[in-house]
Amino acid sequence: MRFLLKLTAFVLTVVLLTVAAASGVGLYALYRYGRDVPEYKQLATYEPPTATRVHAGDGQLLAEFAHEKRVFVPIEATPKLLIHAFLSAEDKTFYDHPGVDFPGIAQAALTNLINIGSNKRPRGASTITQQVAKNFLLTNEVSIERKIKEIILAFRIERAFDKDHILELYLNEIYLGKGSYGVASAALNYFDKPLSQLTLAESAYLAALPKGPNNYHPIKRREAAITRRNWVIQRMLEDGWVSRAQAEKAQAEPLVTRQPGDASATRADYFLQDVRSKLIALYGEDTLYEGGLSVRTSLDPALQDIADQVLRAGLATYDRRHGWRGAFGNINPGPGWRKRLMSFPKPVGLGDWQLAVVLKAGKEHARIGLSDGSLGRIARRELLWARHRLPDYGLGDPVSHTSQAIQPGDVIAVEKVIGYERKLPGESSQTEYVAYPENSYGLRQIPDIGGALVALDPHTGRVLAISGGYDYAISQFNRATQAERQPGSAFKPFVYLAALNEGYTPSTLILDAPFVIDQGPGLGKWKPANYTKTFHGLSPMRLGIEKSRNLMTVRLAQTLSMSTIYDYAQRFGLEKNMSKHLSMALGAGETSLMKLTAAYAMLANGGKKIIPSLIDRIQDRHGKTIFRHDNRECPECQRDFIDGFAAVPQLPDNRQQVTDPASAYQIVSMLQGVVERGTGRRIREVGKPLAGKTGTTNQNIDTWFVGFSPDLAVGVYVGFDQPSSLGDKETGSNVAAPIFRDFMAEALKGKPGIPFRVPKGVRLVRVHATTGLPAQSGDYPIILEAFRPGTEPSSQDAVIRGHDGSLSGLETTSPVDAPTGLY
């Protein structure tokens, strides 16, 4: 008995000494490592780096700018189902333990001892609090020292913060694969859903990922991913979060995740390039990539898609007119061609076209092989355009045999074609559709010409679409905003606008005849000419715009003075440093497509100043609006509804008036004439009220068409990045205008034709379109001309000039009193 008492006393002494020693070791560890742990109180105000998300005008996500793609979601907005999934998978006693789960540690240690020698992965016992300590304040180093610091921090964090705050930090910080930081980002990347729409199975899959996202990849390790997901669901069942029926249904669901390329988001690379630059200028790169901004842009996805399509098609059409530049390269077309083709570098800018190798070139068709191993054919008809390009835009012999364009082994771009329209024999204009055999393709060529298209709202300046080139992958240079080129005749409307404000009318006669001016010592004489090299004598001002007559414009500018023209260029934001040489009246200065389109938009909106804007609103990570494009105050917008109704609030119009509305409308009417009867006749087939102006510079280096409907302004520019001629007869009317036409045809499809709005102070008078005189019986064509009251031509003017518009007496200079110096 005494022996047992002594033994018991000995054992208790050993235990007490062991506990004391352990306590001492623990206290020493706390003392030693507790001094070096990072400051944890920063977690109280911690805001994790969050992605800036850029949205289109309709809310569609366009892009995310981030070093770590994360969307912060407060714990209050996190679905309970997702929270329960993570608690069951990672820390079921989270709301009960003090930061460290001692029973869990003991159980994990016992399990690991049992599994020694097996291939089973060691079981951990880190709580969510410990993971927060490690992820936020420590490194991933595997060591006893780091583990001790982790435990110390876990205790301190638990004492400083409530459980919900700790869980919020964890769910928004944890990495879950596919570039996803936090559960909200993971939900979007894996399932293209917000957290609120996740199913039980999807929530369980996300909760399965913290142990190692690559171990449970939904494609590469599909079986392991489903097994782990189902284990999480089973744990949720055991913890009482879901019913057995819910668990069994979720476990039976297939694992379906969003794959790269699934999303049909609008591509707007050039637009986003400018948005990114604006955000950096406003807030800096750190805020852009980590500040969690929410940016609502003005982009219209439908118009952006149309812009990209018609610009690419227009540039390709121009390029085809000037022949074939040759294949990308050549490979052996013999056995094994597919492997060689697949290893051939994919050309930048190929887009939706396919890469193919020519296997055989016959007289009427060539046989090709594609990278998927299939065979196809190219009919000679699809190669008729592919005459070899010669210097100075000449073309080689017509293609009478496919080998004149392509040779066996050539690696080329092709696009599938299904048929073509063929004109029926005889004088009839009717056609018939001829279908090609299956697997027929057409030869394609990536253009080397540059171009741009801009669409904006003429009333607000909101930019709806930007296409800055054929393909952003080829060149990031934005020709819509970064290129400063000569606008040519597209500048003329602002010369004529100045004249209208000085008392001229659309019927004022201006002499269209040779013009010579001595430019001073050493500069010689300047002799501008019309594009047609013809002269038409005295002509109404309207024809100066409609037919784009240079000599009329120069005479008018000389009479007005270039100081006046310079003032109008300044008003409309065209050229800040424009010289006052007379040639500037013909568009010899430089401006960008964006500036010029905005200037035309001010004509369309009645002469109101607008500034192009790509961003409507910016909110910070907390939802506070920190930027608005429209800063007008609207007290009436806050008014309560009375009986469910309220009057439409009246917003103030604080836009600056840069020109008289009546003069602006007169120019709009004249630009409408450009489309109906002038250099923009190609656009008339759209069948809607449209106005605009062509522009072509010397030697056809730059070509333009800028115009508008009452509620949409669009500009098109085409030219080489290194200025050179586009070729003989390649003008704004047949290069840029067709792109404008195709854009407007699609953009306005299904919409009613809205006439241009006539402001107060304008009187519409029926006149002869060529003479500008009041219309007489039998005259053709007749138009409604816009005049200020009291400036309309009278019937007496018709008597003096004669019915055909010719002058019967030079003592009468015009239908109205015009300033001198026009002759």
Image (spheres, rainbow, N blue to C red):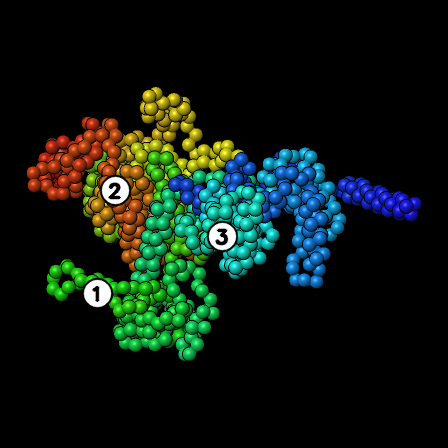
> Label 3 amino acid?
Gln
As drawn, 217 above or below 568:
below
Position of residue 402 in the picture relative to residue 615 (left or right): left
Report x, y in % for residue 564.
35, 35
Residue displayed at 37% across by 43% down: 300
The residue furthest top is: 642
Which of label 2 and label 3 is nearer to you? 3
Residue occupied by mark 2? 751
Q: How far apart are marks 2 and 1 (CA)?
A: 32 Å
Residue displayed at 45% across by 73% down: 340
N-term mark: 2 or 1: 1
Position of residue 743 in the picture relative to residue 483 (left or right): left
Q: How crowded is mark 3: few (under 14 residues within 10 Å), some or many (20 or more)?
A: many
Which of label 3 and label 1 is nearer to you? 3
N-term mark: 2 or 3: 3
Q: Does residue 569 show up?
A: no
The residue furthest bottom is: 334
Residue occupied by mark 3? 251
N-term mark: 3 or 1: 3
Residue occupied by mark 1? 434
Report x, y in % for residue 621.
53, 37
The residue furthest front is: 1
> Label 1 amino acid?
Val
The secondary structure type at the circle numbered 1 is strand
**Which label sits on residue 223?**
none
Q: Distance between the residues labelled 3 and 1?
A: 54 Å
Report x, y in % for residue 135.
64, 46
Q: Do the residues labelled 3 and 1 touch (CB within 8 Å)?
A: no
Quadrant of the snapshot with the C terminus: top left
Pick whichever, 754 or 820, lies toward us: 754
Q: How far apart are marks 2 and 3 (CA)?
A: 50 Å
